[in-house]
Amino acid sequence: MGGQITISLWVFLFIAALALLGLLDRILIPSTRWFLRRRINRVLDEIGTRLDIEIRPFQLTKRQVLIDRLVFDPQVMKVIQEYAHTHDMPQEVVQNRVMLYAKEIVPSFNAYLYFRIGYWIAKKAARMLYRVRVGLLREDRYAEVDTDSTIVFVMNHRSNMDYVLVAFLAAERTTLSYAVGEWAKVWPLHMLIRAMGAFFVRRNSGDPLYRKVLERYIHMASREGVCQAVFLEGGLSRDGRMRAPKLGLLDYMLRGFDPDADRDIVFIPVGINYDRTLEDRSLLRTLTPEAEKRSRWFSVRTTCSFIARNLAQMALQRWHRFGYACVNFGAPLSARAYCREHRVRFDRLPRPERFQHVQALSKTLMRAVAEVVPILPLSLVATVFLNTREARLDIQAIDQRCRQVLFDMRQRGAPVLEIPHSTLTRMIAEAVSHLQLRHMLTAEDGRYTANDKEIPLLRYYANSIAHFWADEQEPYPTEQTGIPDRRSRLQ
């Protein structure tokens, strides 16, 4: 008779766990990877035939390879050695710290997630919330751009919806790599964002190690031709006007740029505007120093309440989209042509002088962005009521004054599109209705008046096009200001 072998339960569980790991490692994981890789390759083959700017090999390189390449970059290694010597630390400790920074910054681009999931979500979200329009798009200008160039979309920053909107509109032409702030590190959102090709940036970090790692990553990505999207303002507009530019990311792109040897960097100005910015009241609140700081729980509760209220309105078929969201594309600006025209070599200049030239270029780009910011119906109506605050206007008077504003802006060279008379009348009426629903306008006997309690919110929307009225050269103010008083011109 055979003997019976008895083992402890914990030994059995240990053996079973080893067998399960072996099964996963040898059979399930390889087959899953093969299945996913096959689908990704199918997507790459499909989109490779229709993208104007192809996906760069840099984006398809394994993430760990890019991390190692970044950590062992000669300039990064030099900073590691200097930091270790200055702070009397082992070089291995400093290098491990740099490795953590590199893992935080480097994205893990996934073409399947970008084009099959991310694009679908962006498209559905944008079209569900807004009437999405592309106002200005000169195909002939972009046909002349060398597709081997590094394309950088330079945009104004109105809302966190900017990421979604521009990614959706640009997906038929190229992939975009964004710099996103620390707000996007929330689990599991950060995995999706990283897979979409975005890289995380710590705002205002004073750590020289972190700054050098970020600089070298942006330099690598730019040199390899990765298409990028940059908000020069560095953050959301608080009062509706464009903010002064931050020079960090632009300087990182240009400080090693050789116009004679490197691929060209082509900046494309992008102007974005909304009839309703989802964060408008929260942004205005940050301008009030005495405002009580809200807790994270309050923000979560408010967001959930906003979503629930809109879902309930959808269920009752009372929900309406938040008006128009429009994107305009301006004329491309070549960094190589700029360097030759101004006789400047960013890679050969000392830091103070280089920053002066980077600042000059950033101002040129900001003006180009400001020139293509869309003029939307709600901003027009807000402008009219701010300049005729005490007036009680009927819909015909509002329509007439909006047309006068458009005429004045067209005279100043603003990007005013030709819109049929009946269509413009309908758009203005919808904007008035939207303002009334949000209590920015009050109505009595068919006449509308600005609500004094909501003047800051009216000014926020009017400020999005206020630079078309401004007499100064810069499209952004040095301090918070409102739109100029032009009542005599609107009477």
Image (spheres, rainbow, N blue to C red):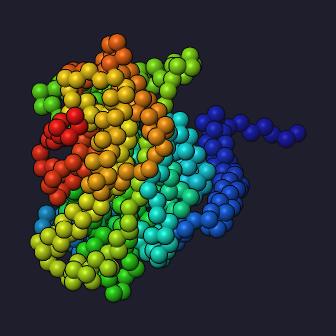
Q: Position of residue 445 (x, y in %)?
A: 34, 12
Looking at the image, which is closer to me, 331 or 218?
Answer: 331
- Looking at the image, residue 446 lies above or below residue 174: above
- Kindly give the residue lying farthest to the bottom in the view shown: 260
Q: Residue 465's quadrant in the figure?
A: top left
Q: Nearer the viewer, residue 269 or 473?
A: 473
Q: Would you say 340 lies left or right of 418 here?
A: left
Q: Nearer the viewer, residue 58 or 379?
A: 379
Question: Quick one: quadrant of the C terminus?
Answer: top left
**Which quadrant, please, contains the N terminus?**
top right
Question: Residue 447: x percent and y percent?
Answer: 32, 18
- Name the residue at 53% across, 35% down: 128
Q: Is residue 224 visible?
A: no
Q: Is residue 345 above or below residue 163?
A: below
Residue at 27% across, 83% down: 340
Q: Is residue 350 visible?
A: yes
Residue 214's quadrant in the figure? bottom left
- Residue 77 position in % (x across, y down): 27, 73
**Percent position (x, y) of residue 254?**
28, 73
Q: Is residue 324 left or right of residue 436?
A: right
Could you tell me which residue is drawn at 55 percent across and 49 percent down?
A: 119
- Residue under the image location 56 percent in, 40 percent down: 124
